[in-house]
Image: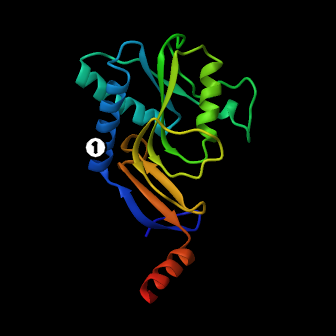
Amino acid sequence: MCSVEGLSVKAEILDESAMARAVTRISFEIIERNKGTDGLCLIGLFSRGARLAQRIAAKIGELENKEIPIGLLDITPFRDDERRANDAGFTRIDFDITGKRVVIVDDVIFTGRTARAAIDGLLSRGRPTVIQLAALIDRGHRELPIRADYIGKNLPTSREEIVKVMVKELDGVDKAVIYGSPDRTKDIAEKRREE
């Protein structure tokens, strides 16, 4: 059994085909909500969100026969917990976002703080017409009033659990798993047996 920081795998949430279906569904929803692709661009959050943004852009391009501008945003300089001034990090946005319909793409939305930092990062580069958010997994527990416009999978979790999205480009496999404390997982399993 795999582990992350002393936690054990509780469940595989998405496998390769489920991830592909979620990307396809999000792509269709983006096209429908934006009434096509005019003025549309995608900004993937470093690093797994960027890989998902590339996949969504490719799917939209395939469906609409049009290339969608895509950028990569490193939110590190805009975080409220580890701010680093004047550090562009891995950001690569080679087009003007002013007047565009921007879709931020992330792998997991949790507290909303990453999305807030991404919005700050985008607004430091221009003034889009609209900013939307796409997340492969929405696990709840918001600390800020932010919601995703496009969601691959809603996943109720406890705050102690960790959701990890893996992509072939970085991890050699496409899947999403949930990790939990081995003791807590065991306690839950025993409690269910008793009921």
The x, y position of residue 176, in whole percent, is: 41, 53
Q: Which residue is mark 1?
A: 21
Residue at the spot 36% in from the left edge and 28% down from the top edge: 30
Please give the count of numbered marks on the rendered protein. 1
Q: Position of residue 157 (x, y in %)?
A: 51, 60
Residue furthest toward the bottom? 194
- Inspect the image, locate mark 1, and give the three-letter code of the amino acid beneath it: Arg
Looking at the image, residue 33 lies above or below residue 160: above
Q: Is residue 103 above or below residue 108?
A: above
Relative side of 59 to 188, left or right: left
Whether residue 57 can be seen here: no
Q: Judge whether residue 193 can be spotted in this image.
A: yes
Q: Is residue 75 above or below residue 127?
A: below
Side (left or right) of 33 relative to 139: left
User: Is residue 23 left or right of 94 when viewed as pictured?
Assistant: left
Q: Quadrant of the N terminus?
A: bottom left
52 and 89: which is toward the camera: 52
